[in-house]
Amino acid sequence: MTAPSLVPGRGVLRSEWIKLRSVRSTTVMVLFATLVAVVLGVLATSSDASGAATMTAQDRAQLDPLGDSFIGLIFGELAFGVLGVLAVSTEYRTGLIRTTFSAVPRRGRVYLAKALVVGAVSLLLGTLLAFGSFVLGQAMLSPEHLEVHLGDPGVLRAVLSAGLYLFAVTMIGFGLGAILRHGAAAIAALVALLWLTYPVGRILDHLSYLPSRMLLFNIADAITRAHPATGKPALRIPSLDLAYTGLALYLVVFLALGAWRISRDA
Amino acid sequence: MIEVHELTKRYGSVTAVDRLSFAVRPGRVTGFLGPNGAGKSTTMRAILGLDTPTSGRALVDRVPYRTIDRPLRVVGSLLDAGAVHGGRSARNHLEWLAATNDLPRSRVGEVLERTGLSSVARKRVRGFSLGMRQRLGIAVALLGDPPILMFDEPVNGLDPEGIVWIRTLMRSLASEGRTVFVSSHLMSEMALTADHLIVIGRGALIADTGTADFIQSSSLNDVLVRTPRTRHLADLLTAKGARVAAEPDGGLAVTGLTTEAISEVAAAHGVEVHELARRQASLEEAYMKLTDASVQYRAKDGGR
């Protein structure tokens, strides 16, 4: 017998797109991420701008115009990650996964189609959100001439990386949803992975900085800044090469584990 | 046609399905009957390629389900009406399913019409009653206009109107030449719907027979006789070769003689007879007797 290929056709891709857009949680998560990114970004950069008059030269040098406009993306991450988790876990919670597999018995095909749709949507919206936060933040800073421009060294890369990071967190959530098949458990695991690992990394710092450098938190820090960090905290922040490699590793590991789990009986 | 060959499914030490073999033929309604926990749903999941059998195989139209490229066009199934996302509308639920198998969008409207859900198509499924969810599940099964249909306990929780609707639908699907395979733990329901019965208990085959034959072959067929002279008539009938048992209410349960023969004996000896009736086991009784030994979870007297 000739096994049909794993590559999903247009129909299966379209079905996953209909699934994603026809539930309210998708819209809620995207709106929440946008709202928080905008509000916090504006608050942080407007506070920078209002303090500009009393700033010393040193203060100005330490100001992080990029980081402050991205501050709301921390919540954005959580919303995107939850979106990724729910794209898989609700199918298991409701038993819908059986209907899905009876319509498309090649489970790898379902998984791939779902990952492609969720991945494309999160990459697009993540990039839009990163650029939006950047533009808005810099607009708040420009009256005081504190802003940076896309043409400045490293800035475009950092903005694109902020969008890329939102995509990566979504897909790690997606993998966790497939591995654990349970929404609350997968979201808890995602929160732990994103933030609760930070103190663990610090405990290990006296042995090696590598664990800290491989944490998503520090990877995000590395790739979303235009200039390398300075001072003692910089020891925990990976080089750009290590950061992108680490991020790719996370994606491969979580998506592969998810693919393996989804091939097991539901 | 659905074929199951020596199908076995074990979960750890529990054998849910035990070397089960049967075939489900087109053009008639085949009932899949067994007590709760007998392995009906497991068998159906194995047919749909959702559960991997421990050994043996299940084929639809001579191939394993998982190898079919657009399976909704071959087999329509309703396993669990609750398995829908409550936040999605009925129409959206059918639309993503239609997309998976490249079915034309017009099919969505057609099955909504046939199941009487057109007026609530844009409503979220969360607000649906159990009966409406069953109808939606049936709409899903009909979506690909498949020659084979499989329903797991479709009448569970339905009101009488819904039950009649499903019964009529299944009969009409079979009369169109389709293979219709319906599970139930209710014998009486199957007696009204199914032409053929596959009865299982503890995962193993108990009977694979026509519904009429199933009732006929039941050993519970006997004749009830009531007479004021119970002992006397019992002796006379026993002498004629009948087996006679006393009923608790004073009647006699006679097997081995027809009503005519019993009447002749009574008349010949001047014995007055108040009642003489042929009794046929109800399907429910025949079924209970058959599956008696195979009920897996039995309520214990008095509890603990």
Image (cartoon, helix red, strand yellow):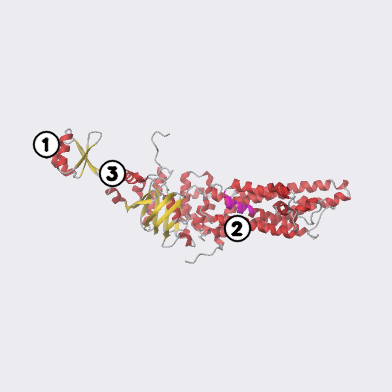
User: Quick check: B129 left or right of B19?
Assistant: right
Q: Dominant secondary structure of the magenta stretch? A: helix
Q: Are marks 3 and 1 on the same chain?
A: yes
- The residues bearing labels 2 and 1 have C-alpha atoms spaced at a distance of 88 Å
Above or below, B277 relative to A22: above
The mark lying in front, picked from 2 and 1, is 2
Q: Would you name the residue on which mark 1 appears?
A: B270
Chain letter of the residue carrying label 2? A
- Crowd class of label 1 (few under 14; some 14 to 19; many from 20; radius 10 Å): few
Residue at label 3? B281
Task: Identify the residue position indicated by label 2 in the image.
Answer: A256
Q: Secondary structure at mark 2?
A: helix
Q: Position of residue A257 (x, y in %)?
A: 59, 56
Rounded to the nearest whole Å, what is the CA distance between mark 2 and mark 3? 58 Å
Residue at point 67% right, 47% down? A32
User: How much space separates mark 3 and mark 1, taking CA atoms?
Assistant: 30 Å
User: Given the image, on which type of amino acid does mark 3 rest?
Assistant: Ala
Residue A175 lies within the magenta run = yes
Q: Secondary structure at mark 1?
A: loop
Decide: marks 2, 3 in contact (CB < 8 A)? no
Q: Give the class, few, some or many, for how many residues have Cα within 10 Å of label 3's Cα (few <14, many ≥20).
A: some
Asked if the stretch drawn in magenta spans residue A138, the answer is no
In the image, residue B275 sits, relative to residue A88, either above or below, namely: above
On the image, the x and y values in percent for residue B273 come to 17, 36
The chain under label 3 reads B
Q: Name the kind of residue labelled 2 in the image.
A: Ala
Q: A149 left or right of A260?
A: right
Q: Residue furthest front?
A: A207
